[in-house]
Image: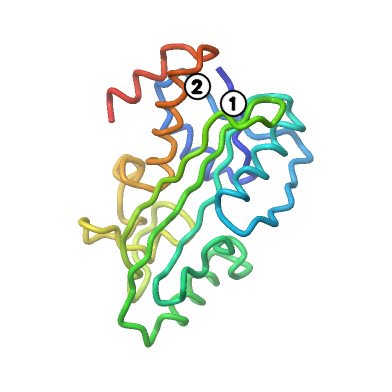
Amino acid sequence: MKIVFATGNPHKLQEINEIAQGSGIEFVLPPDGFDPIENGTAFEENSLIKAREAARISNMISLADDSGLCTEALNGAPGIHSARYEKTAQKRIEKLLNALKNEKNRKAKFVCAMTLVDPQGKILFETVGECHGEIALKQSGTNGFGYDPIFIVDGTGKTMAELSENEKNKISHRGKALRKVLNALKNLTIFSDGVDNILNEL
């Protein structure tokens, strides 16, 4: 069963398919022309905007996520603007580290809002996953992408970028949200029983 994953980010698509491996579901990129206007004021709103746009141009069931990094000391910033905080991933990291250089409170969380819609844009399921931690003083690790090199995951003593893909997928905000989606899909008769496989392994 193929579901459109509403993103232009190949890293996200790869991560989603790794988490969903064995579920009987393959996530694919939306057709050319996918360019939603993300003008929502919350992760949930932007996730719905992207899901409906992907469904509209593909006429397929679509899943979208809107995710970002929220820091306590900066009142939740960069938040929904995480991907647009600066022009490149490295510049975004440098800007955030600079903004927190005099802050003792380095608590932060990754948030992922996911929305599943039918081909007509009707919401089938929506959920949120979170991963808590703190911002490191300097970046470390080479795995992952985005802010992973400066996000120390609670209980691990490691940045997200220092974890293996398997370790990350088990505890990440995106992994938590997707497993909720896969669990919900078991109740939709249009999907095969293959979803059970991955849920039993995690």
> Can you give x and y, in whole percent of width and height, for residue 142 in the image?
39, 57
* Residue ID at (44%, 54%): 111
Whether residues under marks 1 and 2 lie with C-beta atoms below 8 angstroms apart, the answer is yes
* Residue ID at (52%, 68%): 78
Q: Is residue 5 left or right of residue 58?
A: left
Is 87 drawn above or below residue 10 in the view shown? below
Is 110 drawn above or below residue 178 in the view shown? below
**In the rendered view of the protein, which quadrant contains the C terminus?**
top left
Instruction: Name the residue tied to disc 2.
Output: 25
Instruction: Name the residue tied to disc 1.
Output: 3
How many residues crowd around disc 2 within 10 Å: few (fewer than 14), some, or many (20 or more)? Answer: some
Q: CA distance from mark 1 to mark 2?
A: 7 Å
> Can you give x and y, in whole percent of width and height, for residue 90 in the image?
52, 68
> Can you give x and y, in whole percent of width and height, for residue 77 in the image?
50, 70
Number of numbered tags placed on the structure image: 2
Is 107 drawn above or below residue 32 in the view shown? below
Query: Disc 2 residue type?
Result: Ile
In terms of depth relative to the viewer, which is nearer, 3 or 130?
Answer: 130
